[in-house]
Image: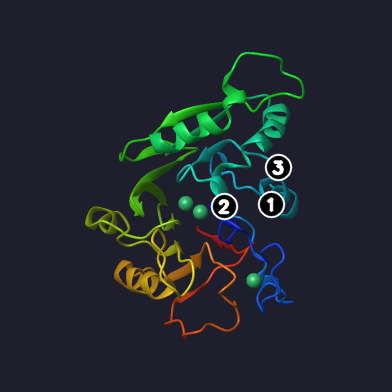
Amino acid sequence: MRVTLLGTGTSTGVPVIGCRCAVCTSSDPRNRRLRPGVRLELPGGTAIVDTPTDLRQQALTYGLDRVDAVLYTHGHADHILGLDELRVYNFRQNAVIPCYGPPSALAAIRRTFAYAFEEGQEGGGKPRVELLPLGHAPFELLGVEVTPVPVMHGELEVYGYRIGPFAYVTDVSFIPEESFARLAGVEVIVLGALRYRPHTTHFTIPEAIVAAQRIGARRTYLTHLAHDVDHAAPSEPLPPGIEFGHDGLVFDFA
Ligand SMILES: [Zn+2]
Ligand SMILES: [Zn+2]
Ligand SMILES: [Zn+2]
């Protein structure tokens, strides 16, 4: 299995439009963050986690030439607005794309992309997706077992996903006990953390560090980062084994 981080930015992306702060004007490529998403190259094909706003740019940059399935974390705009780009994969693969996620995420997709689910003139084509609601039970996807990891994002339950030694848990402000159990023994986790200052629906970096130390992965990479975070200059030192993720980071698992 190979995992590629397609985007590690918060909902605005970094740089933020019009912002002249040190991070937004930085020449460090790791301070350029597209909206959050992940590619999973699995034994039976390629899945992505979410269809972020920047999906087209990510696909071109990282050679995302196939999408056999999508795992949605939740229905917020930064995680779903690239769904229309799936049309290209529909054409190329001549197939409907299965999209899994919590029922609330699929409901948001149905509302936001109403045209894709309505009868009517096709024009340039509509994305053809099959929405497949998930409960909390593990399921089989493209030759691997995927375990949903329910976490709280403010008052909204969203899903992270665990696939064997790897877990991706973004947009999180609270991890229930049962979900810590689902993350036990994971080797690499990509964990959401927004910035240093408190936020109602996201872990701060110090909160994410506490959760990461409890999870105990060999390596933790923080994602969904705002422009408050300078990759090369953390405001507070990160403990060993915990670092900032960046767009294009790749993990290989045997
Ligand atoms: Zn988000
Ligand atoms: Zn800025
Ligand atoms: Zn969100």
Marks 3/2 in contact by CB < 8 Å: the verdict is: no
Please, is residue 200 above or below residue 148 in the view? below
**Where 57 falls versus 115 (above or below)?**
below
Looking at the picture, how far across and down is residue 88, in whole percent? 72, 33
Asked if the residue at tag 2 contacts the one at tag 1, i.e. Cβ–Cβ closer than 8 Å, the answer is yes
Secondary structure, mark 1, is helix
Q: SS class of the residue under badge 3?
A: loop
- How many numbered dots are placed on residues in this image? 3
214 relative to 172 in the view: left or right: left
Going from N to C along the chain, the mark reached first, 3 or 2, is 2
Question: In the image, which disc is placed on residue 65?
Answer: 3
Tell me the element at label 2: strand
Mark 1–mark 2 distance (CA, rounded to whole Å): 9 Å
Amino acid type for the residue under numbered disc 2: Gly
Q: Residues within 10 Å of mark 1 (few under 14, many from 20)?
A: many
Above or below, comparing residue 140 to residue 171 in the picture: above
Q: What distance separates the C-alpha of mark 3 from that of mark 2?
A: 15 Å
- The disc at residue 58 is 1
Spatial separation of the CA atoms under disc 1 and disc 3: 11 Å
Looking at the image, the residue that sits furthest to the front is: 18
Q: Nearer the viewer, mark 3 or mark 2?
A: 2
Circle 2 sits on which residue?
37
Three-letter amino acid code at the position of disc 1: Gln
Please state which of residues 96 and 142 is positioned toward the viewer in this rendering.
Answer: 96
